[in-house]
Image (cartoon, helix red, strand yellow):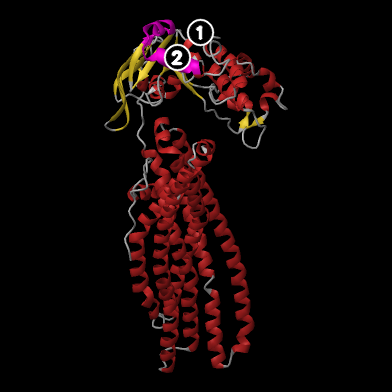
Amino acid sequence: MTDLPPVDPVRRTLPVANRAAASRHAAALLRQYRRPFAAVVALNAVAALVGLAAPFVVGHLVDDLTAGTAYLSLNRLMGWLAAAIVAQTALVWAARRAAFRLGERVFAQLREEFMTRVVALPLSTVERAGTGDLVARTTNDVEALSHLVRFGIPAIFVATATLAITTVAAVATGGLVALPIVVGVPLIVGSTRWYLKRAPDGYLRERATYAVINGIVTETVEGARTIDALGLAGRRRRRIDDALRECYAAERYTLRLRTIWFPQVEISYLLPVAVTLVWGGWLVADGRTTAGIVTAVALYVQQLTGPLDELLMWLDEVQIGATSLARVIGIAEVPADRQATGAVPGNAHLVADDVTYAYRAGHDVLHGVSLDLRRGERLAIVGPSGAGKSTLGRLLAGVDGPASGTVTVGGVPLVDLDLDHLRGEVALVTQEHHVFVGTLADNLRLARPGATDGELTSALRAVDAAGWALGLPAGLDTTVGAGGHALTEAQSQQLALARLVLADPHTLVLDEATSLLDPRAARHLERSLAAVVTGRTVVAIAHRLHTAHDADRVCVVEDGQISELGSHAELIEHDGAYAALWRSWRDEAPVGTGGSGGLGGA
């Protein structure tokens, strides 16, 4: 048997809980639900007891046939058998119903805990992890856990209770005849220990490869136009093929474990049936027991096959479920990126002081950047691609904390503010926006849960969106998002801007919020944006330099440092890096893209 393939190609950012933590979590759930758990076990035990009637009746019938009294006892035995079948059916139904209800309650709690942890994840952690790992945990892992909790736990209860009680019944019926029950134990124990030693790591790797391939496929679909434009289709195809090979290798490893383990366990629980018949036949021939007892015990041993087979089948599913549980609860091990101190900013003065930042240790993106924002000013951050503009914007918005130095508002570091307080001070606005499934009012109240309908309408009116919003079929109560009323890109962006009006931060960091829209839609939205930025401090990360032209000051970032800082006119006169960028952009920009819009309308 080969060892588990190396996992170097699989880079896991989000943590996975260890086995001890997963076991403690499962034990805590059992303690929390110990009463319904005990009820399920009791019902299954009674159902298993009633299920012992059939072999008992058949064994008596064989002895009566041997004694020649079968006719007298047949009706009575059949009556007992029919009653036992009816009682067992009712008990099994009640036991499974109780188990399913317990499973749903446990799964609902796990799902709610998971979603609570996910939405509480630091944004910086989510962005570094990418979509693949998180999507895999919210889909593949949660679904695997759901399958185990809803169906596996009830089945394991039933199988365990049936095995224990049937074994006791076989020994009680004929202890000497029942000795072959242990024949398969060494084989089943040895093969199962071999399997359990290797399976957890195998399934953990398998789940990790699902996360990788999810991420690659999602990124490829989302960036399809860019891939096509740059001729990267072949490279992306090779990347997908590599991920599929990793997935195939991981699944082949776990499949090989099962193909070795399953035949051994099949033999281990079929062998006792054959040995019992041979051994029992010898005991009958030797006069040590009766044919009826041998028949009953053989039927009991045969009856062990079903629950044992189901138990071992679910043992394999338990490995998958345990791996999924470790990945689901592992979300809780992500360290917080901030620790609220309760300090309250004294004013709206935002200052970055000698900050550095690195996405990877030893590779700084920003080097000792200092920036003092003036209250109510419009600051444009410009520079070549990869210079660190967006990174600086994220630090100014408090999305990330600096590796060294400080970013403060009113003298309080942004990382000392809880997220609710932070978003009331500074907000980051990007070209990405999201419409959540729910009513338009629900989407707006994400920014201010207690807002009245009048306040929602005022926010929409502020961004020139009240006309179309109130014209929807049910107005603010119209369901939007997936499966609901479809909003245009411009309407979705206006919805995002209306949320900003409701959140009412004093400082906005704009990372080219309208760059993905066609020019006419962008101009319209920039007028909406002008209403949002009025009276606020605005930091605009400018990819189109007409935004810089209209700003109060321009900050030029090159190689992770601020190389120039001043007004548009001052920097043009200085004839440095900004002047060169301006001339290049002006000469290449299409007619109608400069001089108006952007921050100028504010």
Q: In the rendering, at what x and y percent does residue 169 appear?
A: 45, 74
Q: Name the residue tied to disc 2.
A: 582
**Image quarter of the C terminus:** top right
Q: Which residue is more in the foreground, 416 or 355?
A: 355
**Residue 136 in sight:** no
Q: Quadrant of residue 578?
A: top left
Tally of marks? 2
The amino acid sitting under disc 1 is: Gly
The Cα atoms of the two marked residues, 2 and 1, are separated by: 28 Å
Q: In the rendering, at what x and y percent does residue 101 appear?
A: 55, 51
Instruction: Based on the picture, tell me whether residue 244 belongs to the magenta stretch.
Output: no
Callout 1: SS: loop
Disc with the residue nearer the chain's start (2 vs 1): 1
**Furthest residue in direction left, as rendered:** 362
Write the start and end of the magenta stretch as one range.
565-587
Q: Which residue is more in the foreground, 30 or 183?
A: 183
